[in-house]
Image (spheres, rainbow, N blue to C red):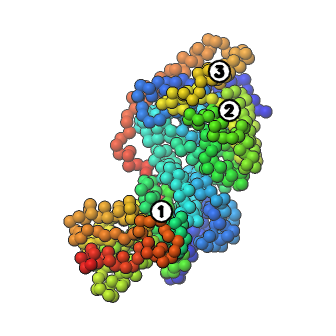
Amino acid sequence: MPAPKKDQLIPFYREMLLARRFEERTGQLYVQQKFNGFCHLYIGQEAVSTGCLNAIRKGEDHVISAYRDHVQPMVLGMTPREVMAELLGKSTGCVKGKGGSMHMFSKDLRYYGGHGIVGGQVPLATGIGFKIKYKKEDNVVLCFLGDAAINQGQFHEALNMAAVWKLPCLFIIENNLYGMGTAINRTCALENLADRAKGYAMRGETVDGRDVVKTYTKMTELVEWVRKTSEPVLIDMQTYRLRGHSMSDPGHYRTKEEVTKERERDCLVLLQDVILSKKLATESDFEHWDEETMEVVEDAITFAEESPEPDASEIWTDVFVDEN
Amino acid sequence: MPELSLREALNEALSEEMERDEDIFVMGEEVAEYNGAYKVTKGMLDRFGPERMIDSPISEAGFAGLGVGAAMAGLRPVIEMMTWNFAVQAFDQIINHAAKMLYMSGGQFNVPMVIRGPNGAARGLGAQHSQCLEHMLTNCPGLKIISTVIPADAKGLMKSAIRDNNPVLFLESEMLYGFKGEVPEGEHIIPIGKGDIKREGTDVTVISWNKALLQTLDAAASLAAEDGINVEVIDPRTLMPLDEELIFESVRKTNRLVVVEEGWGVSSFGCYITDRVTTECFDDLDAPPARVSNLFVPMPFNVTLEKEVLPTESRIKEAVKKVLYKD
């Protein structure tokens, strides 16, 4: 299996660290009421985006996601400035302040959003897969969804179509064990979520999404398998969010002990251990990277705060494309 | 000019556009091997092959969403809903995804997709198969909405809908797929957003579309013959965007307005038209506008009752007389 090369591990770590620090500061800004709306942090799940999105051809393969979407576009190549400015609703944000936390998009990066209706993006991914097959291209589409989305009717409809028509889709359940405050084992009778795939005669896989090495390795294999066979796959990507569902979630539905225990398997800690054990870096390197990362995040915040509000005329743009 | 039925006119528009642009595909329940539940897509599987004519599972939300995704990625889907009643299953995709994609992506992802199918009551299909969905869908910014049964209009507007780079909803009528009219051959385009005066008159402006338009025209003929009332009948053809100027101009001439619409008249599109007219033409009106719509009950199965629930020619005539103070 195509494991990450040694020289990929440090970039992976730094990418995940940027995600972590970015989201920590985002959470603080939200508490300080620097921006409005909902805010779903990615903290704890960083190995998923880094492991999955480094396994594709960035900018060529297609990616679509739900509303926990601050980090994935950055892994694809969006600047932290564009994401932070969007969070603050500024004109310099990736969608000019019209999307906010839940609706990041980039056509250039083939990042199809940022969607706020649980499961609603899954048929869209099937449509992107349909286009790939229709045009006889050799790309794939990665569709991220939460564990709770597998109980939506649209998820079932979309996976069935992807299987019937053999569309090159990777459906990645970011299984953080909770749909908002409801544990997945209270809403889904399956112990192994990948077993859902059997109902569609689709390949199903389970991946340890805390371990970026395992995630990247397995995803590289699966992406190339999908590219080659044009068959879809459903992946139970096992992860954990270390914060609440959203910023307004006090997390009473899970114990402190559980969260403390899960922190021991924090994806950043796991990767740091790998890097140290392989002697690829020293403790002081990690401190140095942290400082550099904080500078990048603070620069993004300054940029966002100093950026102008959208012009009022923007209210009326982008309702329709004018020219046909 | 050849005479075609509504279904033939739609078929001609779809086929000509598919010949022109390989990115267009048709997907829906029974559209390919069965030749369409109402035969609108008859012969198209043989002509365009199974890659472009696709029979879907019964998954309206799923294949509407597939259409949205395919359109975002650059294709031009034509999605058939066997009836608009079934599209209620796909409202999440139509309202939350298709309509909003361009806006919430800051202008990056447009959705050049057509969703088409029959709308309104047929004959004795009962409560779940007899609804007019335009009243709900015109409430949602980001959608263009066409409703027509006139074959020539259907061809010209379907070609425009397919070429439009935005999501366009196209509402037809099951009862009128066999309705015939002269249809220009080849490149016949009617721009979206242009209404049409179907009968010129001076006394009362009556706005109506889709199946109710034909009843309105019958009522107008009868009013002219029996009562000497000269009704002007306007078919907006496109509900969103609405050709308001055509309506205002007519009302400024006749000083009276009636809206005849199938579907329930509570929070309906007719409410919107009367609101626009009373706001913009208040001083021109010589009577309060009147509306004719379905009785506000779920559709009964019994055909005699159904006929009474739908707009009737006698209610249309009463409404016209009312705004003329001749009741």
**In the rendered picture of this protein, how many numbered marks are placed on residues?**
3
Mark 3 element type: helix
- The residue that disc 3 covers is A261
The residues bearing labels 3 and 1 have C-alpha atoms spaced at a distance of 52 Å
Q: Which circle, 3 or 2, is nearer the viewer?
A: 3
Report the amino acid beneath label 2: Gln
Residue at the outermost right position = A1
Mark 1 element type: loop
- Horizontally, is A254 left or right of B315 in the view? right
Residue located 75% across and 49% down the image: A201
The residues bearing labels 1 and 2 have C-alpha atoms spaced at a distance of 42 Å
Residue at the outermost bottom position = B225
> Which chain does the residue under circle 2 lie in?
A
Q: Quadrant of the C terminus of chain B?
A: bottom left
Report the amino acid beneath label 1: Leu
Report the amino acid beneath label 3: Lys
Percent across and percent down for residue B139 are: 42, 56
- The residue that disc 1 covers is B133
Instruction: Compare residues B22 and B67 and report the one nearer the observer.
Output: B67
The residues bearing labels 3 and 2 have C-alpha atoms spaced at a distance of 15 Å
Q: Tell me, yes or no, whether dots 3 and 1 are on the same chain.
A: no
> Which chain does the residue under circle 1 lie in?
B
Percent across and percent down for residue A308 are: 37, 34
Vertically, is A274 above or below B171?
Answer: above
> Which chain does the residue under circle 3 lie in?
A
- The residue that disc 2 covers is A238
